[in-house]
Structures are given as structure tokens and as C-alpha cells.
Amino acid sequence: MERNPCPLCYPADETLLWQGAEYRVIAVSEPGYPGYCRVIWNRHVQEMSQLASAERHRLMDAICAVEAVLLSLLQPITLNLASLGNQVPHLHWHIIPRFTDDPCYPAAIWAEPKRPAPARAIDPETLRVGITRALLGLHHL
Amino acid sequence: MERNPCPLCYPADETLLWQGAEYRVIAVSEPGYPGYCRVIWNRHVQEMSQLASAERHRLMDAICAVEAVLLSLLQPITLNLASLGNQVPHLHWHIIPRFTDDPCYPAAIWAEPKRPAPARAIDPETLRVGITRALLGLHHL
């Protein structure tokens, strides 16, 4: 057994919005970024290129389904998608609605904040229902 | 005609590594990040979720082919993938090899740099040949 087990293989305190066989979707609590979600591939792999092509397509379809729900519910100016894995080398995608008054806009959310977080928020249950409906609608589920 | 034409619809000074009908790959010159590439969808769309599912799959396959070439040529500790579009709302993906001694590691490259750029580099021609070979190998080309 590893001394430091992977925090995405052995998760604690995740706010689950969807749990599937291949991936799950969680809500990320980050002040100033309502609707911030992560899509986590359940199996421990590091890079997107290590997935089989069909797995990668299913994952990207799920990411885009979540993106479309967030665009519709929150009407952000844009959506940021990112797979970094610098801190946790287990494949996971950040899906981040962006607003012109959010702390870092127009820089990436990892840049130095320019302004305080605005009060905008979204009810987690609304998010969960929207994402569940969208992912149930994907042909492969 | 727009007063400020989209810089990815009307590109200037791009270092092209691959030009295809749907997308192109360019080398990004960013000190400390050798092998940094962008994959740009040629048609003007803003978000990944606006592509047809098959288009999105082909784009993600291309991104992963570039990722695999960079992993093989540079042996980075990880690869970062990101579609932000905060500054230029035309779909493009950042593909960034990361090293433990790069300016921002383990933070995202958009964070405050922690150290100077190391001297590591890659010959652009090696990159172009590797990426061309990988993309020619994709079934849909």
C-alpha cells in the first residue's frame, strides 16, 4: 500500500453531483466561481492520452454536457476547461464558468486575484438536477 | 466587417507545426515552457460544447496525439491541457509540458512565477516532424 494514497482514488468530502462507472462529477467550493465543477476519471490514470480513444470521447462528451448545463444555468461570459494534474496526478478536469467581475477575469483563475469575489451563487441542488439530466441524456449511458 | 477582427481567424506570426482542414497546431514561444503548443479550431466557435460530437472527438484525438509526442520527446513530469478563451473567444487549446524546475511548477503556468526559466529547449523542426507524423497517423485524416 502507498504511504500517501491518491486523494482521487480515496476521496474524502467530495460534493458529488453525478457518480458513473467511468467518471464522476463534483461541485468545487471556490469563492467567486459559482458552478465550478470537476469531472474525475474514476480509474487511476495520469494523462488524457492514456485513455482509449472511446473512453476519451465519452469523457469529453460528459465534460461538454456539464459545460452546456453551466452555460444555460449561469450565463457566464465563457467556460474554462483544464486538465492540469500538477498537484494530483490523477486525471481530472476543471470546468469553470467565468464572469467579467470574477476575481481573476480575464486572467486564468490561477493568476493573482484582481478583485474580491462577487456575491453570485447557484443552488447545488439545481446544479445536480441539471447535470444528472444532461448526463442521463448521453447516448452511452 | 468587424472593427477588431478575431486574431485566430486572421492570424499573424504563427509558427505553424501542422495545418489541417479543421484545426491547426502552432508552437508557442514562452520562456521556460519548451514544447508549448496550441491546437486551434479553424472555424470561429467559442466553446467546445458548440462543436458537433464527432468534431470534438477528432479535436481531442489530435490534442492527445500532440500530448503523446510531447511526452515522448521531452519527458515532462506531466502535461497541462486547457481551453480558456478569456482573452480570445475563439476555441483553442493550450498543451503545455511541465517540469519540476519550470517557472511556476507545481502551480498553473498562469500563476506568479517562482523561479527563472531553465535553459531546456526543443528544436522546432523535431517538434514539427513528430507532430506531423502523429497527426498523419490519425484515422480520420
Image (cartoon, coloured by chain):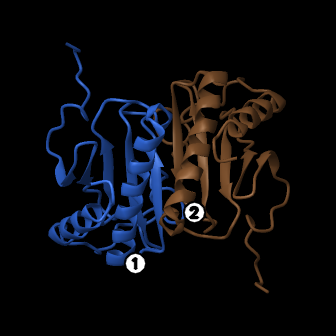
Chain colours: A blue, B brown
Q: Residue at x 23, y 68 (%)?
A: A133
Residue B68 in picture, x, y percent from top left: 59, 31
Residue A93 in picture, x, y percent from top left: 39, 47
Q: Is residue A66 above or below residue A39?
A: below
Q: Is residue B135 above or below residue A33?
A: above
Q: Is residue B97 above or below residue A115?
A: above
Q: Secondary structure at mark 1?
A: loop
Rate crowding at label 1 as few (under 14), some (14 to 19) or many (20 or more) other CA atoms within 10 Å: some
Left or right relative to A2: residue B97: right
- Chain bearing mark 2: B
In the depicted view, which residue is nearer to us: A7 or B24?
Answer: B24
Q: Residue at x 72, y 44 (%)?
A: B28
Q: Which mark is residue B85?
A: 2
Q: Which mark is residue A60?
A: none
Residue B52 in picture, x, y percent from top left: 52, 65
Where the C terminus of chain A falls, by quadrant? bottom left
The residue beneath circle 1 is A75
